[in-house]
Image (spheres, grey):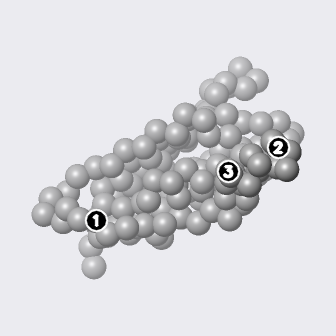
Amino acid sequence: MSESNTLSLSRPDGAKMIRQAQLERFANRTLVRRYSVEFTCPEFTCVCPVTGFPDFATLFIKYVPREWCVELKSLKLYINKYRDQGVYHEDVVNIILSDLVKLLDPWEIEIAGDFNVRGNIKTVIRARHIRQDD
């Protein structure tokens, strides 16, 4: 068996893992107080749906968990699913927010997409959700 075949058998198929990614959650074990969880995703990429050029951003995710927390590896793989998708900046931030709200039903959550300068324009998109008490 060649060395390249041995390597392919011993390591996971990252592209396949990203294609099949699903957000996962686990139970919040600290229900006695509200606290915040923050993630920074400095290597976010997607594709401009008009030009096909890549867009680069840093995503900031901050939420106050209620009953659920997002599992970190699933979030990483989910975020990477956007690398080849054509999507507007405004849409991608709101889609990610909606997916996390559906998964977690947090007390509150905010997503900010800080997109790199392109064509002399800097774009920052923020979307926020605050849970309405029943």
Task: Find the distance from the CA under tag 2 to the CA under tag 1.
Answer: 42 Å
Along the viewing direction, whichever of 2 and 76 lies nearer the viewer: 2
Task: Please count the marks in the image.
Answer: 3
Above or below residue 69? Residue 128 is above
| Amino acid tagged 3 | Arg
Q: Residues within 10 Å of mark 2 (few under 14, many from 20)?
A: few
User: The residue tagged with tag 2: helix, strand or loop?
Assistant: helix
Q: Residue at x 68, y 65 (%)?
A: 20
Amino acid type assigned to the residue bearing label 1 in the image: Asn
Q: Position of residue 66 (x, y in %)?
A: 28, 66
The mark found on residue 28 in the picture is 1
**Above or below, 51 relative to 134:** above
Residue 90 vs 20, above or below: the answer is above
Q: x, y (%) of residue 43?
A: 60, 35
- The kind of residue on which mark 2 rests is Ser
Which residue has dot 3 on it? 11
Say which quadrant the C terminus sits in.
bottom left
**Which is more foreground, mark 2 or mark 1?**
2
In the picture, the disc for residue 8 is none
2 sits to left or right of 131? right
In the displayed structure image, the side of residue 76 where residue 10 appears, left or right: right
Q: Is residue 131 visible?
A: no
The percent coordinates of residue 75 (x first, y second) are 52, 55
Residue found farthest to the front: 1
Q: What's the CA distance linking mark 3 and mark 1?
A: 32 Å
The percent coordinates of residue 132 (x first, y second) are 31, 70
Tag 2 residue: 4
